[in-house]
Amino acid sequence: MLTQLGWRVEDMHDLRFDSGNHSTPADPHNARNCALVGNGCNLLANIVEAKMNEGRFPLILGGDHSIGIGSLAGILRARPDTGVIWVDAHADLNTPITSGSGNFHGMPLGLLMDHPDGVYDFSTLPGFDFLVDGPRIKPEQLVYVGLRDVDQPERVMIRNLNIKAYTMTDVDFLGIGQVMKQALEHLKGRPLHLSYDIDSVDPMLAPATGTKVRGGLTWREAHFVAEYVAQSGDLASAEIVELNPTLSDDDGANETVELGMQLITSFMGKSII
């Protein structure tokens, strides 16, 4: 399909996040599978950075949203001024200090955020030493779209850092067109990275995902987000995550996979006319 849209595709195949036969350090408190996630994200960051420096457009297919730690690190190394559109039901702004679960898929932005009170101490996380000296994302580089399940510490951080955030209430009130217009105006002049979590879509339409929350984007709203960013001409990288066919029955899995594939074609440039 991407070749039909005029893209030439270099398939990097699945990355091998191989733990080998070596023992891994014990997980620190509230940091599940720490070394495995960290080493995998390091590998991904290096590949994404290298491909961007070659002038390629990285399209990353997850995996849960913990891969955003690696993809975003590589993108920020190559283009530090990148604007990030985070389409998600969740803010993913926790760290092991604030997380209730210890799952890294809720931490990518929290770990990489340039916080005035200090950044996270990566020397305490096995596998994450590659992030000790950065990179970091500044609050003004980030826009959320579709939030509807946000932890209390994340709410405080969004407010204190004045992060631009559009919840589903904003989508209801403003309409998805105005939300995306304002989002791109906020990030104007930056290359854009679109991080698209399939759980931003209502689970009636995308049930094959791990952290379902009712009341999400409709089919057309989901596509409009992708289409609008593509039409800006500023999209430089993208990822789609949290699509797991094993988490639904066959019909639900097929519907979610089909939606994911269609969203990819939309943010790679497919339009109705």
Image (cartoon, helix red, strand yellow):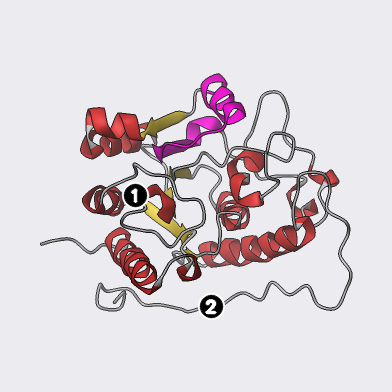
Q: Nearer the viewer, residue 248 or 28?
A: 248
* SS for dot 1: loop
Give the left or right position of residue 177, taking residue 104 as reference: left
Q: Counting other residues with Cα less than 10 Å from the Cα at mark 2, is it few (<14), some (14-19), or many (20 or more)? A: few
Give the left or right position of residue 23, taking residue 141 as reference: right
Q: Nearer the viewer, residue 233 or 99?
A: 99
* Residue under the image location 59 percent in, 58 percent down: 67
Q: Which amino acid does the dot numbered 2 rest on?
A: Met
Q: Nearer the viewer, residue 87 or 56?
A: 87
* SS for dot 2: loop
* Residue under the image location 81 percent in, 77 percent down: 20
Q: Is residue 234 magenta?
A: no
Give the left or right position of residue 86, taking residue 123 as reference: left
Residue 253, given in percent of the width and then of the height, sits at: 39, 69
Residue at label 2?
Answer: 12
Q: Which mark is residue 202?
A: 1
Marked residue nearer the N-terminal end (2 or 1): 2
Q: Quadrant of residue 182?
A: top left
Q: Counting other residues with Cα less than 10 Å from the Cα at mark 1, is it few (<14), some (14-19), or many (20 or more)? A: some
Q: Which amino acid does the dot numbered 1 rest on?
A: Asp
Residue 39, given in percent of the width and then of the height, sits at: 74, 63
Q: Nearer the viewer, residue 236 or 238?
A: 238
Q: Which residues are magenta?
A: 139-161
* Residue under the image location 66 percent in, 50 percent down: 104
Residue lying at the far left of the rendered structure: 273
Residue lying at the far top of the rendered structure: 160
Residue 245, given in percent of the width and then of the height, sits at: 45, 70
